[in-house]
Amino acid sequence: MFMRIAKAYAALTDEESRKNWEEFGNPDGPQATSFGIALPAWIVDQKNSILVLLVYGVAFMVILPVVVGSWWYRSIRYSGDQILIRTTQIYTYFVYKTRNMDLKRLIMVLAGASEFDPQYNKDATSRPTDNVQIPQLIRELGSINLKKNEPPLTCPYSLKARVLLLAHLARMKVPETLEEDQQFILKKCPALLQEMINVICQLIIMARSREEREFHAPSLGSLENCMKLSQMAVQGLQQFKSPLLQLPHIEEDNLRRVSNHKKFKIKSIQDMVSLKGPDRRNLLHFLEDEKYDEVMAVLGSFPHVTMDIKPQVLDDEDSNNITVGSLVTVLVTLTRQTMAEVFEKEQSICAAEEQPAEDGQGDANKVKNKGWQQKNKGMKKVPKSKKKKTLKKKPAPPVLQQPKPQKQKQANGEAVIKEEDEELSDKGSESDEEETNRDSQSEKDDGSERDSDREQDEKQNKDDEAEWQELQQSIQRKERALLETKSKITHPVYSLYFPEEKQEWWWLYIADRKDQTLISMPYHVCTLKDREEVELKFPAPSKPGNYQYTLYLRSDSFMGLDQVKPLKLEVHEAKPVPENHPQWDAAIEGDEDQEDSEGFEDSFEEEEEEEEDDD
């Protein structure tokens, strides 16, 4: 109380305290800001303390652990790609059991995923009407084997998923009650097939790391069948159906008119796009103008991807020299364009080449006609009987030099001495000319050697600069790949039968077709919009020689648009380990200098200690 009275008196009498009171509300000036928590009165009331403790105990000791535990239980059931771990285990077992899986077996294993089981996934449904409608679809399909007892592939949920998937590939209509289930299954198929591809790759890596004969790796055909099944599921087509059925308004009846045409043999999307406008319209004459325009719009939007390949060995002095046991890095540059852009350029180039060719052909015809007329006139003037025979000229006999008569003895001796002096001077001048020629020739040789040395040095400097730039570019690419997070939204896929919007993704891998082996693991390209660079790495063969591999680019959404490119590698013997290196000499010299400096410091310290002792 006394402090308050004193502060009030100071605020009335002292000008500075009064000023602080007016500005800050306190005679002492600005004070620290304080915060508080507004709690209801009944919580602070001592009568309700037991009730408050019970509420806190239930919230933090019962509800919170239950929520965290349920979340943890749901999360551990899924992998990083939101696939049930039980599904991954099922795929691993059956892929290992069946080394070569055809499409029929692959569909059976795919349908055994736990995502379709209502016991493990609440989104999957099972209805009583399935017991009537599913057997009807099985009879219509007629190619499902029900005799094998192989759980979970023969469980009811797996059989339902397999039947609905086969009906989708055959483009059969299903009852309305099953349409929702079929759409749910189709939405899950791309992610499940990608998980199966990952399982196959892991088993291949395990088989290579182990030298046991009993452990057999899955075949390359199983991997490629997974990729083909992804295309089939997105487009709703069976394996050997024509890729032209991906276009709108072209069905089985219309397809016969296109593929069995007398003039044009159209078997693929590329054949259709490469036709000229009038020929294409003549081929699709059974379509109306609106439908034809829609077909052309879809056809022009299909992707056309080109690949540029550059094999090299990174972190090596000679990056282009591939040796035994080295890590080969194949840099693949993917460039995406639409079919319309590519073939418009080709047609414009062909038209530009045909125009001057036609002009030149017309001029050549005129010249030929004139030459033909001149030839006829000449033939009329000179008959065959009056033609002169060309006589072979005999070689002329060689001209013999006549011997010069000997000079008579000259009476005057002075004349003889003069002639000898002239001959000696002539010989001396000839020898001097030869020496000068030799000197000039040696100077020219030295100059040419210097020029060649300069050219070699310049070439070597340019090669070093190019290698340095490539190294910097690779480092920048790695940094961008680590820092940038590219969007997986690339280009929407046109599909008539897929239930949701699908993005255009690709698989890129290297294989040996001769041995049917996988060389590099498939890289899932999910960010290809216009241009993308991908690095595929694999160890070089253990023996030197020439190797022929194949680079594959497969779509996960379109049929008939896969790209194949040969890859040739020339593997050399590994270089011997160097015993001496300039960098090592520099390091040794640096260590010696450091030792000398340390010895000098030690001697200097000893001298100082001796001087102190003397003092």
Image (spheres, helix red, strand yellow):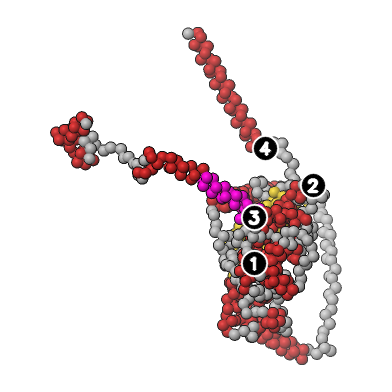
Name the quadrant of the N terminus: top left
Q: Nearer the viewer, residue 492 or 551?
A: 492
Q: Quadrant of residue 17?
A: top left
The part of the chain drawn in magenta is 62-85
Q: Which residue is mark 4?
A: 581
Name the outermost residue toward the left.
13
Q: Is residue 378 visible?
A: yes
Helix, strand or loop at label 1? It is loop
Q: Amino acid at mark 3?
A: Leu
Do the residues bearing badges 4 and 3 touch, measured as CB atoms within 8 Å? Answer: no
Q: CA distance from mark 1 to mark 3?
A: 23 Å
Q: Which residue is mark 2?
A: 211
**Pointer 2 or 1: first along the chain:** 1
Looking at the picture, does residue 523 appear above or below residue 614? below
Q: How many marks?
A: 4
Q: Residue at x 62, y 65 (%)?
A: 184
Please give left or right for residue 256 compared with residue 341 in the image.
Answer: right
Do the residues bearing badges 1 and 4 touch, measured as CB atoms within 8 Å? Answer: no
Q: Which residue is mark 1?
A: 127
Foreground tag (2 vs 1): 1
Q: CA distance from mark 2 to mark 4?
A: 38 Å
Q: Amino acid at mark 4?
A: His
Q: Nearer the viewer, residue 410 or 472?
A: 472
Looking at the picture, does residue 217 appear above or below residue 140? above
Please give left or right for residue 365 compared with residue 603 in the image.
Answer: right
Q: Which residue is mark 3?
A: 84
Q: Amino acid at mark 2?
A: Glu
Q: CA distance from mark 1 to mark 4?
A: 76 Å
